[in-house]
Amino acid sequence: MVMSYESKANRRQFLKILGFSTLSGLGSIPAIWALTPQFAIRNLQSEKRWAMVVDMKKFRTEEDYKKCIDACHTIHNVPDFGNPKDEVKWIWKMPYRNTFPEQEDEYISDGVKQMPFMVLCNHCKNPPCVRVCPTKATFKRIDGIVQMDYHRCIGCRFCMAACPYGSRSFNFREPRPFIKEKNPEYPTRTRGVVEKCNFCEERLSKGLSPACVEACKDNKALIFGDLNDPDSEVRKVLESNYTIRRKPELGTQPGVYYIV
Amino acid sequence: MYNGSKIIVGLIVFAGIVTFPFIYNLGKVNAKPEPKIDTPVIQQLKEKNCIESKEFMKANHMQLLNKWRDMVVRNGKRVYVNSKGEKYEISLQNTCLKCHSNKKEFCDECHNYMSVKTHCWNCHLESKG
Amino acid sequence: MFEKALSGDRRYWGWIFFLLLIMGTGFIFYIKQLNYGLGITGMSRDISWGLYIAQFTFLVGVAASAVMLVIPYYLHDYKKFGKIIIFGEFLAISAVIMCLMFVFVDMGQPMRAMNMILYPTPNSIMFWDMVVLNGYLLLNLIIGWTTLSAERNELPPPKWVKPLIYISIPWAISIHTVTAFLYAGLPGRHLWLTAIMAPRFLASAFASGPALLIILCLTVKRISSFDPGKEAIQTLGKIVTYAVIINLFFFVLELFTAFYSKIPGHMHPFQYLFFGIEGHGKLIPWMWTAFILSIMAIILLINPNMRENENILIVSAVLVFISTWIDKGMGLVIGGFIPNPFEEIIEYSPTVPEVLITLGVWATGLLIITVLYKIAVSIKEKTV
């Protein structure tokens, strides 16, 4: 199902362009362009494009948020350091005014301004984190999931500087002592690597929906599915509701939509 | 030879340092590692076969694990088809360790003997049982 | 030639052991950092780069500034720089080594550093930065060592170094441009997302690097019998004067765009740095110090009569150096992370171990400069 990230043709193409541009004394700028992730991905046929719709109308009580967050963090062995400096998180709450800081409307009710939104990795179509990673430790899968390879990450944290959504956490310390109950079916991380939400790709491969989506399936607060499938639930929800995405002006094309 | 005595003393000290580990361990018997496979899960198996032959696993498990790692993490492929055509889920924690739940007696036995340091367990959890 | 570095008076050895002591302390704390993780520093998930990367960014500029000697000497045949050009090249060597060390101590998984080469990724600017920095180090090692060896043997430098010297000119510009691109291409970091990031980097580099060179040359003049020449130092002073003014001009351009357009995201980092936001303002004293020092330096430098006085010149060089160190180091790197992507103000201050590790790297750089300058001065004392 999944093809290799860059095909051999692309590499050959890169070498050709690199040779050419060096010869013409233009440096390697065209070569960099040719190899930017968008370019590589555009040429591949994608079967799926996973996306999530967060229906904020369905989040009523503290419990509604908590069960999603807990489901994710328990299943993925996300540590709880208990302090903001070392904090690691995959999905969490953020007030509306922080989630959408560019919507500076003075006259929105305080209730909305302070209303907590669910935030997580946006699994962007044009992910800046992937563009900057010097080892391809973070990369975009053919199904749109922005994946981390924890074996390869050197911990340079360039991706954290590049992510405009603050979605990435770094293991500033050994995480294991801070995981309350370890899920034996999923690995932990080690200190010195960056981590983030993976859209539960390990569950998707078994035909399950992401843990957070499943945790709030009673009221369907989170809707998950394939954007490339016109009959999918996400597509129907997106067609019948007005949704917004975070920082659309940056052109990253987030895969997480919000119904306010 | 200028400073002849100094050079000779230096050479003797150098030779001593270099050969120290060999001399130190001379005559000591090191028990041959014997990885154990008598875990409850394995004992219940009718045919006690790993995903590939014992000889293959002995020689190639490290390459296989690296290949598995890249197949899952980088290519999203989670099914391994072995030489007999049987299918297995690719997972260190959920496939290998389900049978080999005795990391100490199985993995560490040889790795310690050969003083091989693996980084697997910095992230992957060893099974409790 | 290394034997020249092994003979020196008590002052020399005292200095060397002092540096070794600081290096040792830094190393001990680095081991601690390796065992504990980068949580030992003041960095957090919001301010994910700190003192280390700030030093790295600043020092790339110092390294690049050697070109300010190479261009006049080799392209314009400005003979007066002939005596000090080696000091520029050796400063570049030490600065690049410090850069590489700062990147290394900033890594979460330093054992995996080779992944950068095992999995080369041309779409990452960091990949190119590694290529140009290492290339620049190699170029300067070869050029510096070869020309100095030739000088010792009282021979003209071999012909094959000339092309390398010409290559080193655009290469020096490239290391600082590529380093600016690390920052200037990130969506959502308003302070960094500016097309004049590379020119700003170069302007501040050509101020801070030659300023440091003035300090070093005047120090060499005081403690050895080698005289770099008054005119060479004065020309360096002129370069610093122009560069520090251009640097300030570029800064004003940034302020104009941010505050005339009134786009909040563009104004916030500057507001934070100079006035504080919501009561947070740890960097305010630093930024104003940098600003006032650079104004003071301009006042001292712009008048040729004052600049000609070497005491005033060295004072202004120190002012420029400190001012650019604050502005381009902490100001630029930390300022870029505040406010965070959620428009929250989360502050940063380095921890003691972080500062000691940083001092350790600086001491290593100074040790390299000391040894290389000692070799160069010993040879020049004989030949000049």
Image (spheres, coloured by chain):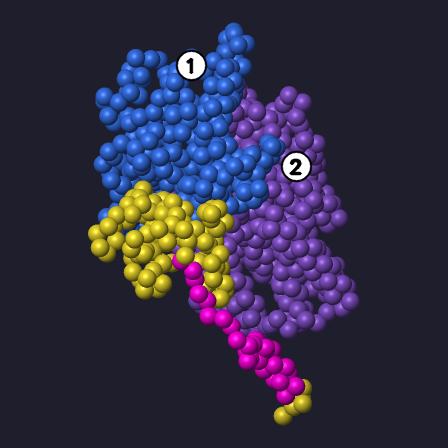
Chain colours: A blue, B yellow, C purple
Q: Main secondary structure of the magenta part?
A: helix
Q: Which quadrant holds residue C297? A: top right
Q: Chain of mark 1?
A: A
- Local SS, label 2: loop
In the rendered structure, the answer to whether residue C312 lies left or right of residue C170 reads: right
**Mark 1 sits on what residue?**
A58
Q: Is residue C381 above or below residue C282?
A: below
In the rendered structure, the answer to whether residue C79 lies left or right of residue C161 reads: right
Residue C180 bears which disc, if any?
none
- Residue A205 x, y percent position in the rendering: 31, 37
In the rendered structure, which segment of residues is drawn in magenta? B8-37
- Residue C63 x, y percent position in the rendering: 56, 51
Q: Tell me if residue B97 is in the magenta stretch.
A: no
- Local SS, label 1: helix
Count of numbered labels shown in the rendering: 2
Mark 2 burial class by Cα count in 10 Å: few <14, some 14-19, many 20+ = some
Q: Amino acid at mark 1?
A: Lys
- CA separation in Å, label 2 and label 1: 40 Å
In the rendered structure, the answer to whether residue C326 lies left or right of residue A186 reads: right
Q: Nearer the viewer, residue B68 or A101?
A: B68
Q: Which quadrant holds residue A37? A: top left
Residue drawn at (23%, 22%), measured in percent from left and top? A230
Mark 1 burial class by Cα count in 10 Å: few <14, some 14-19, many 20+ = some
Q: Tell me if residue B17 is in the magenta stretch.
A: yes
Residue drawn at (52%, 52%), measured in percent from left and top? C110
**Mark 2 sits on what residue?**
C349
